[in-house]
Structures are given as structure tokens and as C-alpha cells.
Image (tube, rainbow, N blue to C red):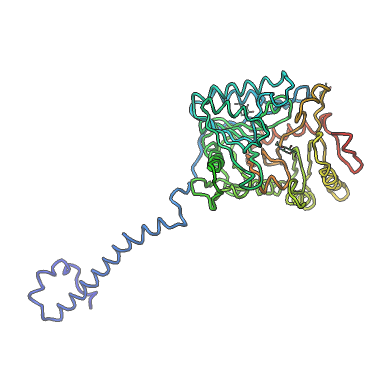
Amino acid sequence: MMSEIPYEKVGDVESVKGEYHKSQRFYRCLLFIISLATLLLTLLFFQTLLVPMVTSSPDKPQHMPVRETCTDPCRIVLVESIPEGLEFNSSAVHPSIYQTWLNLISETRSSLDIASFYWTLTNKDTQTHEPTADQGERILKELTQLSGKVSVRIAVNTPKETKPQDNIEILKNAGADVRTVNMRELTSGVLHTKFWVVDKKHIYIGSANMDWRSLTQVKELGAVVYDCSCLATDLGKIFETYWYLGQSGQEIPSPWPSEFSTVYNKDTPMELALNGTDSRVYLSSSPPSFCAEGRTSDLQSILSVIRDAHKFVYIAVMNYLPTMEFSYPKRYWAEIDSELRRVAYEQRVHVRLLISCWSATSPTMFPFLKSLAALQDSKAKLDVQVKIFTVPATPHQKEIPYARVNHNKYMVTDKVAYIGTSNWSGDYFVNTAGSALVVNQTSADSSAPIVQKQLQAVFERDWDSPYSTQLNHNTNHMDMC
Ligand SMILES: *[C@@H]1O[C@H](CO)[C@@H](O)[C@H](O)[C@H]1NC(C)=O
Ligand SMILES: *[C@@H]1O[C@H](CO)[C@@H](O)[C@H](O)[C@H]1NC(C)=O
Ligand SMILES: *[C@@H]1O[C@H](CO)[C@@H](O)[C@H](O)[C@H]1NC(C)=O
Ligand SMILES: *[C@@H]1O[C@H](CO)[C@@H](O)[C@H](O)[C@H]1NC(C)=O
């Protein structure tokens, strides 16, 4: 039996070959050698051929990011623009977006990436010589100076020919790198995102456009996270999608190359400390075609935050419509609307919507909002309330076009803070580019610094303010806007 041949014989084989070449033993030996050689060759084959084939199989791209522990000392600060003349009797006060942008510009050492919808930081567009445009003008001046010193990249929605482009020209001439993203051609939407990534270390995200009015005449809300390269790296990947699509003639890749992928999403958020409080954080993006592998779409993040609420869902957005606002023929789109009705009914969650109105508000919004507000019935244990927030204007302020409105876009539940850049109607989740920061501090103890608590206080400040009016079935919106 081959297995009986003592192992040492193998080394001896050459020396015994001549003596026993006619014996059976020789053939047994030969058989053994052949078997052994075959075994060795097979092993060799596996090692040199199959193993590399497995590791480089297309299912496991070599650049697939891995989850890393984030030890950055991240700090999150809510920031706001409160329009001139608006006053709240409340302790919920946050740094201004203007001051925050100035800080970020002065902090920049090597790079500043800005995703933007349009640029009107000077008030040339209105010809009103408005003194409150000074903050926007200062920001443009600082950005212009910075563009000569460090890498400044700007991704902007391809402007309509009629729109002023002098801000962008000034920045380009100063050395900024600008790419226009032709969303109309790519998705028939717009690039509506507004965020900054500084030195791949600090981020700003929020509702404010690169518009002087967003600093002094329009109510805005955003968040800035300092010293947080983990989060900045992930937001940087969303910026890179715009930067990539800003090359001329570019099409939306499907799938996106793996360097755009993320491992941080609603199911596996990034775990980090924000102001020392354990938090689970991720960034969502829209439209879905811009989401590389692993990225949660904006709509899915909104739905999951609503679904996860136990006590309340407070929503503050400029526009709320269960329709595709800008599509013809008309299309009904009730993904968010149904989810709100469902949690109000099934989970007895208190739902409050604080919506804005101004002269340009679509009248279609009101019957749909009234229909939501009709779900108010204490006997049926349904609590859905809608209020309309109006920013008052003096006769002089009324002359400023596209101003005096509450433009913020956020949601706060008993568990999570969601800070976004999109209006809430179908278009913004189907073909318009936007993004959001989702912060979950469910497990934190109540005395810890929690951004969800701060955002709740902002919502309650606005909801209880004299600028908000309850909407019910007989409200005439013409009296409000
Ligand atoms: C502000 O609020 C406090 C407490 O709610 C109240 O006592 C005070 O009268 C208010 N002041 C104004 C100017 O409304
Ligand atoms: C928030 O985190 C908790 C775990 O800490 C998780 O159970 C919950 O689903 C998360 N909520 C959302 C909306 O992601
Ligand atoms: C949100 O909707 C309003 C009304 O349709 C529109 O004017 C505005 O551009 C949209 N959002 C912005 C600028 O953030
Ligand atoms: C985090 O710390 C900063 C000061 O460094 C403070 O302004 C901010 O409000 C804190 N954030 C929270 C959520 O407490």
C-alpha cells in the first residue's frame, strides 16, 4: 500500500532507482512520486493561478472603501440666517451663516470645494443698491482672494444664459477652478445642492444659496462640522460626483466607479463623537442615479427617519407638495405624504409641518396641506398639524425680489436630526441633485450635548412665534402670503 511507504523513502528515491528497477517496489515508488508531483503541481496551480483570480474577482473591487474607526474630535454647530427685522423671544440662538462662511474661509489652508446652485453674492442682479448686500459682497471678496492662494473648486448648476454670471467670472479670473454641471441634460433637473468641504476636514451643509439674500433677507438653516475628516472625506465623494459630471459631454456612469462608493449609509452609519457625544452619522444624496454603491438616497433617508420616530416628526421646509411640481403631464407623488399619514395613524406619532409662503408659492400646495391638517382628531388619536411661516416685509423690503421667505429644509424627530438642501416635492428626489446630513444620537444620555435637541428648540421657537399661522380647512392662503 502506498500509504505504508515510509515518508523518508521519498528523499532516497534517486539512490534506490538503479537497484530495484525491475521490482514491483520500483513501480510502487514511481506511482507514489507521480501522485506526489501531481499533488504538488495542483497546490502550486491553486496558489499561483486561482488565488489571485479570487482576490481580483470583479465582485470585490480593489478600491472598495473599508469602515474605519473615526477618532476625529468633531464638533457640530447649527448655523442660521435670520432675515433683517425678524425677532424671536427665545434662547435658541445660533451663529450666523455669514460668520460661519467667513470663519471657514479664514481656516482654509489647502482646499475649498463648493457645490452650488447659482451665484448672486452682489446685488447687481436687483439694481436696488441694498445695503444688506454687504455681507454677500464681503464673502465674494474673501473667496476671490482665497482663489489665488489655495485650490478653490466650484461645481455649479449650468446657468441659464439670462442669469448673471459675473460672480463666477470674477472667481475664475482669480484662479478658482469652476465646472458647470448640466443637470438639464443629465436628468432634466437642477444642481440644488449647497455645501462646502474645507481642507477635507471641515464641512458646511444647508439651505443657503450663494446669494446675498441668503445671508440677510432669507431665513436659512445649516450645520457646520469642524475637525471631522471622516465626514469631510465622505462628503468629498459627493462633491467628486458633481466634479466628474462637470466635464463636458459626460454621462452618468452606471455603476459609478468604486472610488465614489461609500460604506456609510442608513444601515451602517459612521460612528463618531460629535462634541464628545456618541453619534451615528451619514450623508444622503439625490437623485438616485448620482448615488454610488453604498450611498443612501435622500428619499430613502427621509422615509427611514420618519419611520423610526416614536413620538414626533417636526418638518420645516419651504415647499411641500405630494406631486412632481415641475413635470408635464401632471404626476402625483405621495411617497413622503403616505409615510407621514401612516406613522400618525399606526405609531400615533405627532406630526407638525412648518411650511413657508411668499408671493411665488404655488397655490396647489394649500389644498394638499389642508388635507394633511385634516388628520387632526383627538378622539381618533390623530395629531397632524400644519402651520405657515411668513417673513414680514416693510414696503422697502418688499421691493427686493426673491427675498423675505423661510427657506430652511430640515426635519427633527424624537431621535434624529436631518439637515437637507431640498424642497419637499417629487422632483427634488427624482431628478434634482441635493444632499443631507443625518445625525442619530438615540443612544446618548439626555444631559450630553445633542444637536437633535438644539434643532427641536429651533423648530419650537419658530412654531410658537407670531410669524406662524395654523392652517385649517377654511384658511385663505391669499391672506397669508
Ligand atoms: C418672552 O418670553 C418670556 C417667557 O416666555 C415672557 O415672559 C416675555 O414677556 C416675552 N417677551 C416678549 C417681548 O414677548
Ligand atoms: C438610530 O440609531 C439606532 C441605534 O442606536 C437605530 O436603532 C435606529 O434605527 C437609528 N435611526 C435611524 C433613523 O437611522
Ligand atoms: C424651492 O422651491 C421654490 C419654489 O418652487 C423655488 O423658488 C426655489 O428655487 C426652490 N429652492 C431653492 C432655491 O432652494
Ligand atoms: C459643539 O460645540 C460648539 C463649540 O465648540 C458649540 O457651539 C455647539 O453648540 C456644540 N454642539 C452641540 C450639539 O452641543
The answer to whether residue 74 of the structure is visible from this angle is yes
Outermost residue toward the top?
131
Question: Residue at (33%, 61%) from the top-left corner?
Answer: 49
Position of residue 294 measured from the top left corner of the image (x, y, whole percent): 55, 49
Q: Name which quarter of the figure residue 363 lies in.
A: top right
Please determine whether, in this image, residue 81 is positioned above or below residue 365: above
Position of residue 419 measured from the top left corner of the image (x, y, whole percent): 66, 38
Please determine whether, in this image, residue 32 is positioned above or below residue 53: below
Task: Dividing the image into four quarters, tell me where ligand 3 lies.
Answer: top right
Which quarter shows the C terminus? Answer: top right
Question: Residue at (82%, 46%) from the top-left corner?
Answer: 368
Residue placed most toward the observer, 433 or 421? 433
Report the label total: 0
Which quarter shows the N terminus? Answer: bottom left
Position of residue 466 measured from the top left corner of the image (x, y, whole percent): 84, 29
Question: Residue at (83%, 22%) from the top-left corner?
Answer: 394
Residue placed most toward the observer, 94 or 320? 320
Outermost residue toward the left?
19
Q: Name which quarter of the figure residue 248 lies in.
A: top right
Outermost residue toward the right?
474
Position of residue 103 measured from the top left corner of the image (x, y, whole percent): 58, 23
The answer to whether 345 appears left or right of 211 in the picture is right
Question: Residue at (52%, 47%) from the top-left corner?
Answer: 261
The answer to whether 46 appears left or right of 64 in the picture is left
The answer to whether residue 73 of the structure is visible from this angle is no
Q: Name which quarter of the figure residue 163 lies in.
A: top right
